[in-house]
Image (tube, rainbow, N blue to C red):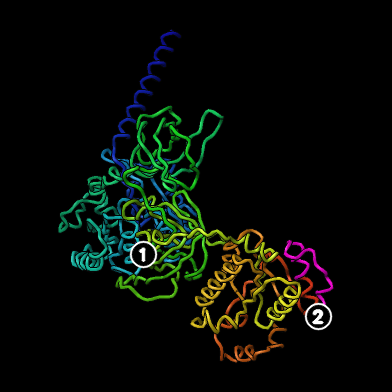
Amino acid sequence: MNSLAQIDQAQEAEGAALDINAYMAEQEKKSLLRFLTCGSVDDGKSTLIGRLLYDTKLIFEDQLAALHRDSRKHGTNGEDIDFALLVDGLEAEREQGITIDVAYRFFSTPKRKFIVADTPGHEQYTRNMATGASTADLAIVLVDARQGVLRQTRRHSFIASLLGIRNIVLAVNKIDLVDYSQDVFERIVEEYQEFAGSLGFKSVRAIPLSARFGDNVIAPSQNMTWYDGPALLQYLEDVPLDNADEAKPFRFPVQYVNRPNLDFRGFAGTIASGSVAPGDEVVVAKSGKSSRVKRIVSMDGDLELAREGEAVTLVLEDEVELSRGNMLVAPDARPDVADQFAAHLVWFAEQALIPGRSYILRTETDQVTATITDLKYRIDINSFAQEAAKSLDLNEVGVVNVSTQEAVVFDAYGSNRSTGSFILIDRLTNATVGAGMIDFALRRASNVHWQALDVDKASRAARKDQKPAVLWFTGLSGSGKSTVANLVEKRLAALGKHTYILDGDNVRHGLNRDLGFTEEDRVENIRRVGEVAKLMVDAGLIVLVSFISPFASERRMVRELLSDGEFMEIFVDTPFEECARRDPKGLYAKALRGEIKNFTGVDSPYERPEHPELHLETVGRSTEELASEVEKLLIERGILFNYDQSSWSI
């Protein structure tokens, strides 16, 4: 008996394994649709997803029991189930009745697999909506039948079009609250199609529904006999997928060089587009060196073919220079490699985007320092008109020119969403402040090349018998920056050093005479002076720069223009009250009376240096003492050596 029982158990286990394998094989054959729900606040996005999961019987018993409990505690529908709580998982979301973060859910029907992203409707969380849209094939734009098309409806539709989504479902929700009115539905559809006609959508399917009561969610509603179109789920199951990705050229961003021993060197990453097989020719994007694929290594063994989305390690036949930040590509369809390009940019930060400011730019596989060199125009969300602008504020969209410190590899976003996108990161806070879609490389990036010169910085400095450097004096107006810098330059000149001083007021009489004192102009002011200081260092000079330079990001930008050790930040620290008391030019008195706008320390901020090379506290100290502190710094950094210190008595 025991033997028979064991045989029965083994057969049952084998049958279960076969059932699981059959189920997995069936799932593999199904197509996958990624979609998101978006729209304005309280349009019912989370409720719609919860209703879809509930009506398709994809909620486990324990989840359903928890949903009943949560609905009594946090729900907004009285005794009824609040389906939004299935996807609003954060405590703050439940307390406020809103969506904050992006929530992803997987579900499956007999026809198709789905991954849905529930995105927030509040303007302040637009960046989260953009995150959800970046990988979606379709967007469900919800509109409250009582409210109609709102500003956020337009914003989300526009961002969806920018991010390459070509299929839209216009879900006119809460139709029950307008008595299932056909007139209301048709008016909203007409208004939406009027502005969305220019966004390049391939299809816009309008569906009236009630997410709370399930009308037209998975089956046709008996309350809207006037509507003869498909229910939402039926449409999602049948909407054709764009198979253009299969025809895209091979792109393999290298994420890691795998070298476990002397006999193996592979390049690990995830295929961004196209496919590859052993024997295929590939090209290193940045160098143009070619090789052939020897092996495709995966955790399941070697593969004969790898496609988009698969994480693999490629072994090449030749030893080529290749590392993270580079890309293996198809030889007959290479991407752009450039350090300047045009792009659409969605701005996420409370602090405005200002051209000239330095950010960290991160692509699919690379990370470089970048600057927005030009804001071409801002796009009005309501009319989609192009407007002249000097900055981008929170959630605004514009077209910009970007310059990177090093060349990056990319495709146009319209051709490849994976390799044509980037994010911008604030250098000080590490916050993501913008997301961009690359339009095209600028011609100047390929037409302008560095000219090789025989006389370099080292030889120029050697002829002057000195080490070039930038001494960057920063502090409030009236802090004594120029006075200290002037004395230091006199002493250096007495030692036979070749110097030049760039003073803020003097430069504004010539190079920067076209700039004012807005935040945008202040950034450009420092950018220009930084470039001039770099040229002077290249000439072998010791450059003394005396500028208020109120923003830490611009001082950091100049530091990164120079080689290690060439930039020395000197913080001339004089309290605001003392500067206002001195007021050598009478500017503080005017600023405090409101006669001067954007005056640093009064109505424009000054960001104190956190880690300057030298911190000069000026109160109670003479200019000579302060200059001697600079002398010690120059000795420590090897700028001054083998000289008679008595000459510093000047």
Vertical placement of 480 versus 426: above or below? below
Magenta stretch, main secondary structure, is helix
Q: Nearer the viewer, residue 527 or 103?
A: 527
Question: Can you tell which mark lies on residue 133?
Answer: none
- Indicate left or right for 468 with 136 as reference: right
Specify few, some or many for label 2: CA neighbours under 10 Å numbering under 14, 14-19, or 20 or more: few
Q: What is the distance, in whole Å, between disc 1 and disc 2 at their CAs?
A: 59 Å
Spot occupied by residue 118 in the image (x, y as percentages of width and height): 39, 54
Residue 487 in view (yes/no): yes
Spot occupied by residue 232 in the image (x, y as percentages of width and height): 25, 51
Question: Can you tell which mark lies on residue 40?
Answer: 1
Please give the name of the residue rendered at 32% of the width and 46% of the height, measured from the top-left corner.
Answer: 333
Three-letter residue code for mark 2:
Gly
Spot occupied by residue 201 in the image (x, y as percentages of width and height): 25, 58
Q: Nearer the viewer, residue 535 or 273?
A: 535
Q: Which residues are magenta?
A: 630-649
Name the image quarter holding the C terminus: bottom right
Rendered image quadrant of residue 45: bottom left
Q: Write down the residue under mark 2.
A: 620
- Are discs 1 and 2 less than 8 Å apart at CB? no
Vertical placement of 435 versus 487: above or below? above
